[in-house]
Each structure stands twice: as structure tokens, then as C-alpha cells.
Amino acid sequence: MNTMSSQGSPIPAEVWDQQEMRDALARREISSVYRLLRRHGVSQRQIAALTGQSQSEVSEILKGRQVMAYDVLTRIAVGLGVPRGYMGLAYDETTAVRVAATADSPHPEEDESVKRRKFLAHAAAVTVGAAVFGADSGSWVSHPTQTPAPGRIGMTDVRQVEAATRALRALDYQYGGGSCRDAVVAQLSWGQQMLGASSTDVVRTRLYVALADLHNLAGWTSFDTGLMDSARNHFGQALDLAKQGENEALMANILYRMGRVYLHQNAPDDALKVFQLGQLAAQNSGSELAVGILCANEAWAYAKMGSDEQALKLLGRARDEFSRANVAEAPAWAKFFNEIDLSSMIGTVHTELAQTVDAKYTRTAIPALSKAINNFGDEYARSRSFNLTSMAINHLLEGDIDHGAKIGRQAVDLSESLKSVRTKQRMEPLRQEADKRRNNPEARELADRVARFTGTESAA
């Protein structure tokens, strides 16, 4: 019997999609998985070689020894080529592709503007209960195969999800989404199972909110690693769960983050629509901090569109809302936005205005960014990188090229330690400004270094 796959693996890819195998994987019954592989002609020696186990270990597992350790399960999944989501280890991109490939009605790849419209339709329907932007919310919400759920959960189980989310969010802030996204998705795979468990109404409501925030973090880390469709999936599911949990402040935060995705894609019109939906949820929640965050980001969207009057008006409102907010009592997903982050946003908006309207806005941008840079600790390395990049742009616009190049090099130095695609992409305006000044050797060296780091090309 020839069991070789086209890639030379002794295990055909279709083996993993057979129902008996899927059931064994979902239950993490490795002994059953190994026995099924033996039926397909895979020897104990081959299993041992692929999984890094000894043949005696494989033999013991075949006899019924359980495998419980997460790292061992992961090693087995990776070695054998099992889509990790089939084992509830992580709903990874490989699993997503395979699940999508077996869908009854596969959808062709859509233009990004169509995907944005569909998300807006869904966000409007969830937020205000009406299909403001059209009825079709699209097929971007994925439906991963669920592993068996625990029978009953209590508040302790929900607190574990919340604690894991806080810890993983801290890793994201400090090292970038690439440092923790797999762990976030793995935790989400486990947390999603709880939706099938029985619980009290109080526990279930809090579970909805906890899982909404975990999806929120999964969306943010996906965004930070350049996985835009995955980000949209997670934010869409986060929005639904937050609505079920009746937490409008979290809905506002989710919409703020999705709007940031559109700002990053240079689609400020769509970003503004999402921010405005978030503003409705923020106002309904009664949270001044949530309102302030949305105002600051709406200001950024207007700045990208070159509307300085609207941008400055919304920044002023953001300051007012923040002055009334009690940050100490804010939930984890909003607590990051303190006085330092407000200064960062003021500097960011004025940097945008300096590029789109008038270089005079550097005079406000530079001191605001300086305050943020000097106060962001090591735990906010990514934010510090963004601000150093903006600071360098401002100094180049002012004509202080040598100093701008020096700060730009600091931004690259810091960004090289981060696992964040977004930090590279945010440096493109810096590369462009440095390229315009290539007659200066410091600017030329900076442009070339940023180009090497980001994988873009500088002007000749």
C-alpha cells in the first residue's frame, strides 16, 4: 500500500479529515490517532521519527498511555502535520484554510474594499440594530470545528480566561503580536469550548465578555502580524460576543481597533465610519474614557483626510473626556489609554497634519511625542517605536535632518527587536521623507537602512 503524499510525507493529507481521525484528534486521544495511522501503513518507526519520540514511547502510547502535556501534543501535531486546530491546540491558519476548503459554498477572493463594506454592514447591524451600510455582512466570519466542551463551568473558569488575556496582552504591548498570537489563538480555542457548557446566567454573561475580549486581542495580534482577514474575523466575532454580554464599552473598543486597521490600510473614510459606530457604543456605555479614545482616533482619520479643523476639534473633545475619566477603574482593554497615550495621539495627529496640511503642526507634534517617548516604559516598546518614527518625520519636515536621521535610526534599532509587521509598515512615511533628502548623507543612510529593514526600495 503506497501511503506517500505528494510532498513525500508518509501520511496522506486526507487522513486527517476522515471522521474517525477527526474525532480522535478532537478528544486528543493520541493512542487512537497512532492506531489509525498504523491502519494506513505508517510504521511505529515512522511515527517516532516524525514526532521526535522513541519507539518505546510510541509503543506505550499505542497500548493506551495518555498524552496530556501541551508541548508534547504540539510537537506531535507539528511532526505529523496535523492542523493544530483539529486538536484544539490553536485554530491556526492551516486549519482555517482546510476548513474553508471543505465548505459547501466556497467564496472567491474579494477585493479589500468589499470586505471593508461587509464588515461595516455587520458592525452597524450589531451596534445599532440596522443594516445601515447594506444587508450583506459577508462570509468573513469563520466557523471553526469545535472540540468537546466541558460539561459545566463556573466563575473560576471565566477568570482563568480573563487572566490569560491580560498576560498575553502585556506580551503584545512589549514584544509585538508575533510574540504571542499563536498563544492567543490557542487560548481562544480552549475558551470557545466553554460556550457549549452549562452555567448560570451570570457566569455566561461574563463568559461572553471574556471571550469577546480574547477575540479582540486575537484580532489585534493578527493585525500586528499582517493577517488582515484573520483580524477581521476575530473582531467580527468579538463584536457579536460583546453584544451578547451587553458590554457596550467593549463594543466601542473593538470598533476602535477595527478602525485602526482601516487607518493602517489608508482608508480613512471607512475608518471614520467604524469609529463613529464605536462612538455610539461608547456614549451608550457612559464611559468617558471610551468616548475619549474614539474621539482621538476620529481626529486621526480626519487628519489623514487633511481636515485640520475637524481633527483639532475632536482632539479637544478627547482631552475633555479624558480629564473626566477614571482610568484607574477602567477595564483592561481600555486601561492602556492614559495621559501618556493621549500625548502620543496628540503627537500622531499633528504629525499627520504636518504631512497633509502644513509643516507648522510639527511645533505641537514634537513636544507631545517627546512626552510620550520619555514616559513609555519597556513594557510599551512598540508604542515607543511608533512615536520615535513620528518624531523623526517631524524633524525631517522641519529641516533638522541630522537629528531626524539620528532619531530614525533609534526607531529602527528598537523595531528590530519586535515581532510586529505593523512597525515596519508604519516606517514607510519616514523612508519617503528621508528619500526626498538623499543629497544629505545622513538622510540617505537612514532611507537605505529603513528600506533594508522593511524590505522596500529607496530611490536611486
Image: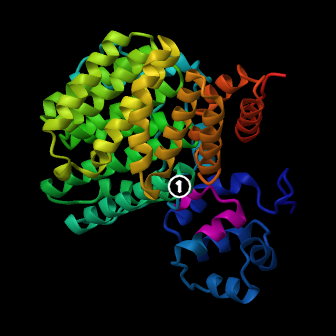
The quadrant of the image that shows the N terminus is: bottom right
**Left or right of 281, for residue 50:** right
Residue 70 lies, with reference to residue 388, above or below; the image says: below
* Pick the front one: 59 or 392: 392
* Pick the front one: 293 or 89: 293
**Left or right of 243, for residue 35:** right
- The local crowd at label 1, few if under 14, some if 14 to 19, many if 20 or more residues have their Cα within 10 Å, is many
Q: How many marks?
A: 1
In the image, the segment drawn in magenta is 74-87
**Residue 383 visible, this orientation:** yes
Residue 46 lies, with reference to residue 170, above or below; the image says: below
Q: Is residue 440 magenta?
A: no
* Spot occupied by residue 197 in the image (x, y as percentages of width and height): 28, 59
At horizontal 37% and vertical 12% (from top left) the residue drawn is 308
* Spot occupied by residue 184 in the image (x, y as percentages of width and height): 46, 55
**What residue is pinned by disc 1?**
175
At horizontal 61% and vertical 46% (from top left) the residue drawn is 410
* Spot occupied by residue 5 in the image (x, y as percentages of width and height): 82, 54
Magenta stretch secondary structure, dominant: helix
At horizontal 20% and vertical 53% (from top left) the residue drawn is 206
Three-letter code, disc 1: Tyr
The quadrant of the image that shows the C terminus is: top right
Q: Secondary structure at mark 1?
A: helix
Q: Residue 47's quadrant in the figure? A: bottom right
